[in-house]
Image (cartoon, rainbow, N blue to C red):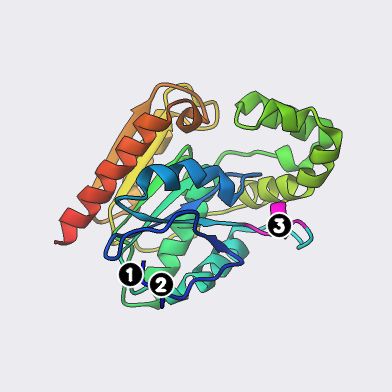
Amino acid sequence: MDQGEQTDDLWLRRFHEGVDGDPLLVCFPHAGGSAAYFFPVSAALSGSANVLAVQYPGRQDRRREPPVDTIDELAAAVFTALRGVLDRPLVFFGHSMGAVTCYEVARAMERETAGSPLGIIVSGRRAPSLHRTESVHTRDDQGLIAEVRSLEGTDAGVLGDEELLRMILPALRSDYKAIETYRYRPGPPLRCPIAAYVGDSDPKVAVSEAAAWRDHTSASFGLRVFAGGHFYLGARPAETIKAVSEDILAFRAAVA
């Protein structure tokens, strides 16, 4: 990657050096997640994409910062952090809360610049125009932990360590508040393609709800259904990486 390229090291983490000319794959974590979740993705794609992972405040090395509890504020901050690379070919990949966040960043990019991502990949999340009433963020600590445990995406060792739990609960609660209080504001569909991924037994999103992302783009749309639940991508990393690689190639071909 060009050493002169300017990125925001507070918000954007690079785990492996990529190849000049390859697109930037910007990865947005789920509620309670961190940039490190995408380390395996970065390692697997290091020969074909430059992977940047978003680090939200309130966790890991940013744990002393107050977490952000609205998607609007989170998306605005990430968009600002990406300004130094907006002239590069970009692909966004967001899982769960990260799917809505990357969608709003793509909207901001198309609204405020002349550009657009090559495409966005939205995983484990219903289309933004579909609303479910959810209130996990209002539960007590044990109720919040029970919800996270039911989705099977957090290491059992973390959930069983009281000290670690105390460290992650504030950010986790803020993330849930952000996504549960998010409300879609109607506007033009994205000009870039959307690829939607979903597990066939995901309790948080039905396949039909993932398919509704097609209404949010004026370009091409693709839907991939994987065997598994909300965190199918952790159980099937090779399948996920293969799908991401194929969609990046398709996005690039569409503008060639």
Looking at numbered disc 3 in the image, what kind of residue is underneath it? Asp
Vertically, is 189 above or below 145? below
Q: Nearer the viewer, mark 3 or mark 1?
A: 3
Residue on which disc 1 sits: 88
Residue 53 x/y as whole percent: 51, 55
Q: Which mark is residue 61?
A: 3
Membership of 60 in magenta stretch: yes
Question: Which quadrant does the N terminus fall into?
Answer: bottom left
Range covered by the magenta-colored residues: 56-63
Residue 141 x/y as whole percent: 83, 36
Q: Residue at x 79, y 27 (%)?
A: 160
- Tag 3 or tag 2, which sits nearer the N-term? 3
Residue 66 x/y as whole percent: 76, 61
Looking at numbered disc 1 in the image, what kind of residue is underneath it? Arg
Q: Are marks 2 and 1 in contact (CB under 8 Å)?
A: yes
Dominant secondary structure, magenta: loop
Q: Is residue 5 left or right of residue 23?
A: right
Q: Is residue 171 left or right of residue 91?
A: right
